[in-house]
Image (tube, grey):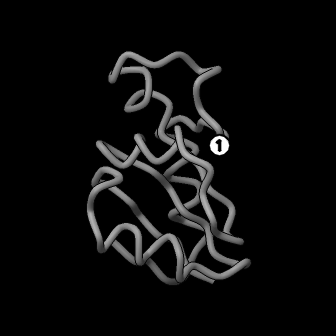
Amino acid sequence: MALVLVKYGTDHPVEKLKIRSAKAEDKIVLIQNGVFWALEELETPAKVYTIKDDFLARGYSEEDSKVPLITYSGFIDLLEGEEKFIG
């Protein structure tokens, strides 16, 4: 299991690769401009989360996100629970 961070927008090829290659037991967290991925239908078996403050700061409402929103403290909980990290 790994925690995958996506911090760049939908036009970034490396972020596309990270999302596509994530496995079912992995978790993906969308941060910074990576939150724009939360507006897309993502093709990944991994569980995906979006940082709520980053998403709302870009002018979206909670209802606009297609993935669950989490707080920064929730993000820290995910970080502490995973032994691998992919940034």
User: Is 13 on the left-hand or right-hand side of 64?
Assistant: left
Q: Position of residue 62 (x, y in %)?
A: 59, 21
Type of the residue with mark 1: Val
Q: Quadrant of the C terminus?
A: bottom left
Q: State which quadrant residue 69 falls in.
A: top right
Q: Residue at x 50, y 70 (%)?
A: 19
Image coords of residue 85 (percent x, y)? 43, 77
10 Å crowding of disc 1: few (<14), some (14-19), many (20+): many
- Residue lying at 67% horizontally and 40% vertically, measured from the top left: 68
Looking at the image, is 77 positioned above or below residue 46? Answer: above
Q: Is residue 14 left or right of residue 39?
A: left
* Circle 1 SS class: loop
Task: Check the image and report above or below for 53 versus 22.
Answer: above
Relative placement, left or right, of 47 versus 15 is: right
For the N terminus, give its image quadrant.
Answer: bottom right
Residue 42, percent from left and from top: 60, 57
4 and 82: which one is in front? Answer: 4
Tell me where residue 5 appears, x and y as whole percent. 41, 63
| Residue identified by numbered label 1 | 67
- State the residue at coordinates (34%, 21%): 57
Q: Nearer the viewer, residue 1 or 57?
A: 57
Would you place residue 87 above or below residue 40 in this image?
below
